[in-house]
Image (cartoon, rainbow, N blue to C red):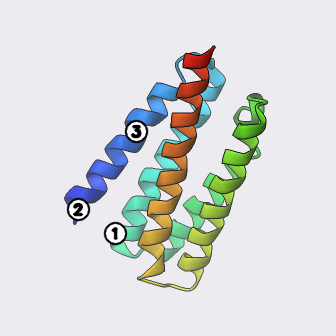
Amino acid sequence: MHRKWHIVVGLAAWLGLGAGGTQGPEVKHVMREKLVRAENILEAVVTSDWVSLETNARELERLTDDPRWTVLKYPEYARQTAGFVKAIQALHLAAAQRDLEKTPRAYVDVTLKCVECHRYLARERIAK
């Protein structure tokens, strides 16, 4: 089980670093902060640390309002961000309910939203 989580985090880290290559240091910095929050959330999910989980989920959602996050002006990026925020909110709700079934699934959904967005951004760069 732990091995699967490490693979998910490793994939998210790889994608997080890869997407920031041509977007400037500010976007790269906010994506690095996103990754740190995601790693903290994973640890909180695995250990059922509900306070840390709620705090980091709230901070991860807060990042999406950061001007460094919103520097990309593609309509699809806005749609991707909205899906990401919705997934974070579902994670926060599962954490607030102390739901041991929904919380890990919600975390995986947050991770998948990251992967989908990073794939989209990679395709955009290739198309340009």
The label shown at residue 59 is: none
Question: Is the residue 123 above or below the residue 39 in the image?
Answer: above
- Quarter of the figure that contains the C terminus: top right
**Circles 1, 3 touching at the beta carbon (< 8 Å):** no
Mark in front: 1 vs 3? 3
Disc 3 to disc 2, C-alpha distance: 16 Å
Q: Quadrant of residue 125?
A: top right
Image point (59%, 30%), residue name: 121
Which residue position is annotated with label 1? 46
Distance (Cα) linking label 1 and label 3? 18 Å
Q: Is residue 61 visible?
A: no
| Label 3 crowd (10 A; few <14 / some 14-19 / many >=20) | many
Q: Nearer the viewer, residue 51 or 71?
A: 71
In the rendered view, tell whether residue 74 sits above or below residue 101.
above
The mark nearer the N terminus, 1 or 3, is 3
Please give the label number shown on residue 2.
2
Mark 2 surroundings within 10 Å by alpha-carbon count, few (fewer than 14), some (14 through 19), many (20 or more): few
Identify the residue at horizontal 35%, vertical 42% (top origin).
11
